[in-house]
Image (cartoon, rainbow, N blue to C red):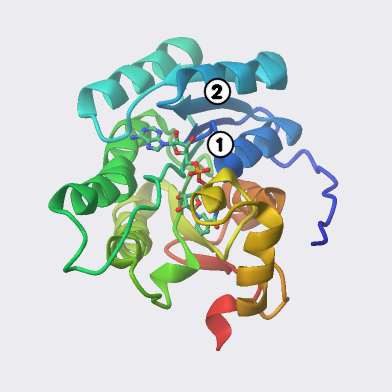
Amino acid sequence: MSMKRHSSPMRLAGRIVFVTGAASGIGGAIARRCVDEGASVICADQSEDAIVDLAKGLGSQALAVRCDVTDGHSMERAFETVRQRFGHLHGLVHNAAAPSLDGTVVDLSEEQWRREIDVSLTGAFLASKFALPLMPPNANAAVVFIASQLAHVATGKAVAYCAAKAGLVHLAKAMAVDHAADGIRVNSLSPGAVATPRLLQRFPDLGTADAALGPKHLLGRIAQPDEIAGTAAFLLSADASFITGTDLLVDGGYATR
Ligand SMILES: NC(=O)c1ccc[n+]([C@@H]2O[C@H](COP(=O)([O-])OP(=O)(O)OC[C@H]3O[C@@H](n4cnc5c(N)ncnc54)[C@H](O)[C@@H]3O)[C@@H](O)[C@H]2O)c1
């Protein structure tokens, strides 16, 4: 498995970015990358110890906020903390996802279905509902939803995940229409398989995950979290100032064939 080292341009200097699901894999990499590029980052997750540790490691530019993205009161409190501490916000990355416990429509429980939709889609709705009023107009504020290549092509026994991720891609488009007049850009980012703890729910180790999933990607390997984080930072930055209402596939060519 090869990994490209990033060099960090300071594309996000002075920006304030809220990242959900920051305690693990891709969310942690996005938080780190935003700090590296000059942003102050609110690391939001339900897993309190992990975000406190992450924020400590990132230093004074990071703030840990415990919240449950499925709970409106919890999200309102989290963004009130942002308002009191920073006054405004330039970026939202909704990255949290429920553990991958999926199935067919026949064997998936109603509770599992609701959990997936709640964390991915309702979480995006709630985070956006409280984030957007904190975004100054015409300041290149941006929202990024972390979707999946499985928003574009389906796979077996993943009905809730596929549906939730496709919903996120279209939610971004609908929001892009509503908020373009304020200069707020809304996009989604669809990774292929990425080496994170999430894959350990299905494979004994990341080497086995890469051997099984790598060949499904044109590039013959799974991604490293920082390869997704670099693209998220790009979408949040002025380099992406004319990009809104789109989905960016960062999937090593998975969805091409
Ligand atoms: N890893 C992959 O192969 C892959 C591929 C495509 C897309 N994605 C997407 O990228 C995103 C991040 O993936 P990952 O692999 O880093 O996931 P992960 O499972 O390692 O981390 C998810 C994080 O979300 C948090 N979370 C879950 N429910 C929450 C809730 N209700 N409130 C607050 N936080 C909550 C968890 O505590 C965890 O820290 C997800 O949206 C995932 O669907 C991942």
Badge 1 marks a residue whose secondary structure is loop
Q: Position of residue 31 (x, y in %)?
A: 61, 34
Disc 2 designates what residue?
50
Badge 2 marks a residue whose secondary structure is helix
Q: Is residue 62 above or below residue 69?
A: above
Which of pointers 2 and 1 lies earlier in the amino acid sequence?
1
Relative placement, left or right, of 256 versus 2 is left
**Picture quadrant where residue 41 is located:** top right
Disc 1 designates what residue?
24
- Residue 222 makes an appearance in the image: no
- Label 2 – label 1 distance at C-alpha: 8 Å
Residue situated furthest bottom in the rendering: 257
Q: Type of residue at label 1?
A: Ser
Relative placement, left or right, of 254 versus 172 is right
**Residue at point 47% right, 60% down?**
244
Confirm if mark 2 falls within 8 A of ligand 1: yes
Confirm if mark 1 falls within 8 A of ligand 1: yes
Quadrant location, the C terminus: bottom right
